[in-house]
Image (tube, helix red, strand yellow):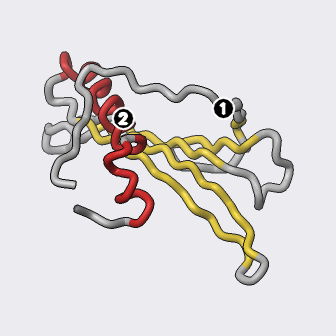
Amino acid sequence: MSTITLLTGGTTATTGGTNQTFAPVGKNVVNGTAYGDSSVTDIMAREEVVLVSRAAAVTQSGAWSKQKSKCTLVIPHYDADTGMHYSLVRVEMEVSPVHLAAVSTLIGTLREKGAQLIIDSELDYFWNSGARP
């Protein structure tokens, strides 16, 4: 692969499949909330989504810190020989609030293009094997 193509102004959506419902699980998460698959009663085998965020703020020097948002999906799987394992995907976004009027548009663009990085078939080889071009 010599290039990566991302759509600008496109619509990224997932279609088909079955809804999987995640409900708050009451786990203590600093600056966040944990959600578990509400159809699974065994907490060791339950898929989990954790959302963590930190708002932008003015620092002591008068500069702005970045707004940070992080979403993690953890999928447990059991192997008879080695026990329980937890695989995950984590999506993070950091946004500089310097141009406050454009932040909403910037966040939309980051989400649009970030989603494509996960689902774009051009990157399948990278995601499946870790190989880079």
What is the secondary structure assignment of the residue under circle 2?
loop
Q: Where residue 99 appears, x then y in whole percent?
A: 14, 24
Q: Nearer the viewer, mark 2 or mark 1?
A: 1
Q: Is residue 16 above or below residue 64?
A: above
Give residue 11's quadrant in the image: top left
What is the secondary structure assignment of the residue under circle 1?
loop
Residue 125 is labelled as none
Q: In screen coordinates, is 50 left or right of 121? A: right
Q: Earlier in the sequence, mark 2 or mark 1?
A: 1
Residue matched to label 2:
55
Quote the CA–CA distance across marks 2 and 1: 34 Å
Q: At x 13% / y 44%, what residue is drawn?
A: 61
Disc 2 + disc 1, Cβ < 8 Å: no
Q: Where residue 44 appears, x then y in whole percent?
A: 77, 61
Farthest-out residue, bottom: 81
Farthest-out residue, right: 41
Q: In screen coordinates, is 17 left or right of 132? A: right
Give residue 4's quadrant in the image: top left
Identified by mark 1, the residue type is Gly
Give residue 117's quadrant in the image: top left
Q: Where residue 12 appears, x then y in whole percent?
A: 40, 26
Q: Is residue 53 above or below residue 18?
A: below
Residue matched to label 1:
17
